[in-house]
Amino acid sequence: MTVSTTSSAVLPPGLVVAPQAPDLLVPVQVRRGVFGFLRNNPTVAIGGAILLILVLIGIFAPVLWTVDPTALAPAKRMRPPSELSWFGTDALGRDVYSRVMFGARVSLTVGLSVALLATLAGLAIGLVSGFVRWADAIIMRIMDGLMSIPPILLAIALMALTRGSVGNVIMAITIAEIPRVSRLVRGVVLSLREQPYVDAAVACGTRTPMIILRHILPNTLAPLLVQATYVCASAMIVEAILSFIGAGTPPTIPSWGNIMAEGRALWQVKPFLVFFPAAFLSITVLAVNLVGDGLRDALDPRMAKNL
Amino acid sequence: MNAPLLQVNDLKKHFPIRGKLFRRSTSRVYAVDGVSFEIARGETLSLVGESGCGKSTVGRAILRLFDVTAGQVVLDGQRIDDLSADRLRRIRRRVQVVFQDPFSSLNPRLSVRDILAEPIRNFDLAKSSAELEEKIAALMDTVRLPRDALDRRPHEFSGGQRQRICIARALAAEPDLIVCDEAVSALDVSVKAQIVNLLQDLQREFGLALLFISHDLAIVEHMTHRVAVMYLGKIVEMAPRNRIFAEPKHPYTRALLSAVPVPDPTVRRKPMILKGDVPSPINPPSGCRFHTRCPYVFDRCRTEEPELRQTAEGQWAACHLESLP
């Protein structure tokens, strides 16, 4: 069934060969690899770059011209930003710049750990309820129950049961985020199960674990990755809120939330106490959301050759 | 060789409709309700009928994509409707499928090579990776796709090419029977012809039996040996191709055939137009299922269900009109 495209050399009289027309569309340069992907998706590149800087800040906080973020200095309380203390000092004389730099660690740790843990747990729960019909009803009723409680309230309640520590904060926010992720995964799994290629794989003798691994899981990853970035952003905000109301990170560990909480009483007279941590938090959340939006557009399976 | 390859005896598939509260079964959809037929080796049986008449359900039941409600599916003398999952998996090699939509029947994240390797690996049809590679390349030749397309993904192909990949995947298992579930319905006319010709060539080459599920009677007439006409979950007529197109017995078959357009504007004919819609398979009519729309209906049709009776050599019809005298 090969189609012959060669035109015959002998033309009937009255006909001429069409002239070679120039290409209307200039060929697009195919960009491959990680850098090609980033150039094709500038939102991911910008968001990723900002996140990378923040991660580096978190890692190298001790050497970024910081002082001990918990060192009290009653003599120089509430200094405005100056060349000595770039972001000023707080009510106890601690250097706000150092506290904000070290605070990045808490926010990023919480955001990334919650995103990872909630995604993995949600993926497992979602796969089970998408595949095991009898378990679905039970699991989803529990998830509905968890979802009916606002996530912040749930996290506050969970924190009230434990001691304030970064680990407990991560756990509380993870539990609050799991229902959303598992609902998403379950929905995707249910729709993928009905795809003809899954039926064809069954007819090809593929076993159920392999069907999940080869045909279901890779096609859930794209929406899941996007969801993970939103979970990450939301976790950072919830962490800040928990610390702000004193239910989160203990005051001995600086986090953007508790820096803001301590500056709250004075923010009309000394706005810089709240401004700097708030700005960092906003920029971080914005960067994570940029990555999420960019990935959502980029991870359309038809575009995802390079991943 | 005289024993049929596939025998379907009184196959039934009812789907329960579950109520919202506690998922009680409130009523059932009688999707397939007592269907029997045979397919010989190397034969094409076409299953035709309106949408919703249960054609695809029959195909999926033969593929054992779900458990059947009642009846038997016998492949080469072995019942496959009650096999355990593990034994069924080995039998699956012999019955493969090509679906209607070439866009959703290939996993978008796998390369053509991986798609074709899957059945070969599952059924241990290649002893070494070199043999696997050889088989995959041969499959590409068989369905007339270039070998260098192996590393591409499905979205880089056209609909017709994807359907060729689906056919190659079905052939990879070295089956005896391929269920073509509306396999050419979604394709352009010219591509459709190519795929139909390819299927015919493959049938001749490998001695494949085909269960060709379709609503396109022109294609069916072109490529089939026998035709079974389904209406509301039952076979109403079954006959060799020549007889069904020349001398349809069942009123429904006649109505179906008269709906096929004739590519000649000078031909005058009286189309047989059926009144009303197909009744719901949740609550099928009593007696003959076709009595609500049949132009020749009489009292007996409303109460007594007609059986499939032989009216001529190889031709079977389920109609009281045929069994009167």
Image (tube, coloured by chain):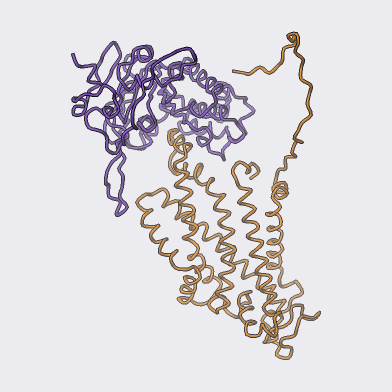
- The count of marks equals 0
B165 in relation to A32, above or below: above
Q: Quadrant of residue A275?
A: bottom right
Residue A152 visible at all = yes
Visual hue assigned to chain A:
orange
Residue B91 seen from this side: no
Outermost residue toward the right?
A83
The residue at the point 60 percent across, 66 percent down is A109
Q: Decide which of B285, A239 is in the foreground and name it.
A: B285
Quadrant of residue A93 in the image?
bottom right
Residue displayed at 72% across by 40% down: A30
B129 lies left or right of B1: right
Give the residue displayed 78% in from the left and 23% down from the top.
A20
Q: Position of residue B172 (x, y in %)?
A: 50, 27
Residue B314 is situated, as x and y percent measured from the top left of the image, at: 30, 13
Give the vertical position of A256 relative to B59 (above or below): below
Q: What is the display colour for chain B?
A: purple
- Quadrant into which the N terminus of chain B falls: top left
The quadrant the C terminus of chain B occupies is top left
Q: Left or right: where does residue A307 sit relative to residue A181? A: right
Corner quadrant of residue A115:
bottom right
**Residue B110 location (% of width, % of height):** 56, 38
Q: Is residue A124 left or right of residue B61?
A: right
Q: Position of residue B159 (x, y in %)?
A: 56, 30
- Asked if residue A64 lies left or right of residue A180, the reply is right
